Image: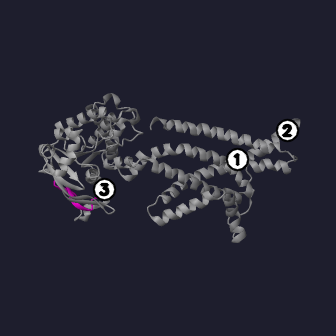
Amino acid sequence: MAILEVEHLNKSFERTEVLKDISFSLEKGRVLSIIGSSGSGKTTLLRCLNFLERPDSGSIRVNGEVLFDTSDPVTTQESEIRKKRLHFGLVFQSFNLFPQYTALENVMLAKELLAKGQPEYKQQKREMLARIEEEGKMLLGQMGLSDRMHNYPHQLSGGQCQRVAIARALALKPDILCFDEPTSALDPELTGEVLKVIRGLADQETTMIIVTHEMAFARDVSSQVIFMDDGRILEQGTPAEVIGNPSEERTRQFLARFTQG
Amino acid sequence: MELIAEQFPIVIQSLNIGFIQTLKLFFVTLLGAVPLGLIISFGSMSRFRPLSFLTRIIVWIIRGTPLMIQLLIIYYFPGLVLNNPIWGGGESGRFLAASVAFVFNYACYFSEIYRGGIQGVPRGQEEAGLVLGMTKSQIFFKVTLLQMIKRIVPPMSNEVITLVKDTSLARIIALQEIIWAGQAFLKGSQGISGAIWPLFFTAVYYLIFNGILTVLLGRLEKKLDYFR
């Protein structure tokens, strides 16, 4: 069964329609890449999945559970949305690390706050915090940042910051991890180290949605590709279909820019 | 010179009493204006248009007119125009009126500094907190507040030092602060008259106090230097 099902999602800002009837689904452990030119609605789609934007209509289901459905008003209440966000993780283009915390503290913060809300926190405070720290260190180790975990974001390179941000998102064990152009703010030299980490996550069958302009990477790492244009899904399928042999003229035009160099 | 040495103990005692009144006004203003400024800044940033409009009008009036005029209006208007002297007589009445004028005036200046501080924290910080499942109040206290404080420390230091000197404006409603105490020896007080040096000497008090504040605020700024 699909881990994520999105149906008939629409979103407008003022009078501009940014998302037009978006429907797709994603299987557990698979990677979906969303490609398309700037302004095609890719980022808005990710933001809708993370409830940073509220869709005007449509539904979002994770593991069969309805997270959001405009035909069922109970699911769209603000108080309900916070918990639902935890099904998704989001890695931003500009990292958005918290500057006053070290790499490790960035990774631990949200988890600590969640732990504090639990009834057993009072008795098992020390054990719980120790476990969170242990997990945080392990995650940063996985990202190749063991020697950097006590550094502040301004002491880290862009690539290192983005890896901390990935660890921070993973710490909450989201069902689906989303990336919003994770390498667009990085020097070409630093892009590789971040892509390597994402590739590693794909090998571990992490369910991911990646908005990217790295065509070679998208083709390589994903099991499914969506091409968006003007708020619509114009084409979707395997990378071989969408990137290798697109059926739409618009997709060919878009991809031509990347192959021409 | 000999004369000054003779007058010195009497003058210092008087100036000390005046300076205590100065310090009282300073601390009361700070204590009142720091939180009130936050409320006003929330008002001016409100999405409810009439509220933000009204707040901005008030801030414009308060920042656009001299504090001295505000002191005079607040002190004399209730009694002389409305025939309702709410402040009561004597030094305590003058202090109360001066406190109200100063708190309100400084809260308006602070509110603009806070607004800059709050709006200066990138939107992405809040969004990062939201997608990590934090509540709005957790985001404010654990993420944005410290970044905001870091941004406002330098402009606030400036305002605080200005406030120390502005307390002397309360002289206009005869609040017995240090300038008033120094000036008394010009007109004649405790057997000393025609002496201008006590008035000049008040500057030393301001200078030393502001020196201490500058060091303390500089330390605070340095403490927040560990992140960017």
Q: Which mark is residue A92?
A: none
Residue at image position (24%, 36%) is A195
B10 drawn magenta: no
Residue position marked by numbered label 2 in the rendering: B4
Between the residue at mark 3 and the residue at mark 1, the CA separation in whole angstroms equals 55 Å
Residue position marked by numbered label 3 in the rendering: A53
Q: How far across and down, in percent of the image, does residue B12 sit?
A: 78, 42
Q: Earlier in the sequence, mark 1 or mark 2?
A: 2
Residue position marked by numbered label 1 in the rendering: B20
What amino acid does circle 3 point to? Answer: Glu
Residue at image position (31%, 53%) is A52
Bin the neighbour count of mark 1 within 10 Å (Cα to Cα): few under 14, some 14-19, many 20 and up: some
- Compared across the picture, whether A153 is left or right of A218 comes to right
Camera-nearest residue between B228 and B104: B228
Query: The magenta stretch spans which residues?
Result: A53-67
Respond whether the residues carrying marks 1 and 2 are from the same subunit.
Answer: yes
Camera-nearest residue between A126 and A93: A93
What amino acid does circle 1 point to? Answer: Ile
Camera-nearest residue between B127 and A140: B127
- Compared across the picture, whether B144 is left or right of B178 comes to left
Q: Are marks 3 and 1 in contact (CB under 8 Å)?
A: no
Bin the neighbour count of mark 2 within 10 Å (Cα to Cα): few under 14, some 14-19, many 20 and up: few
Camera-nearest residue between B39 and A22: A22
Position of B67 relative to B125 (above/below): below
Q: Quadrant of residue A99?
A: top left
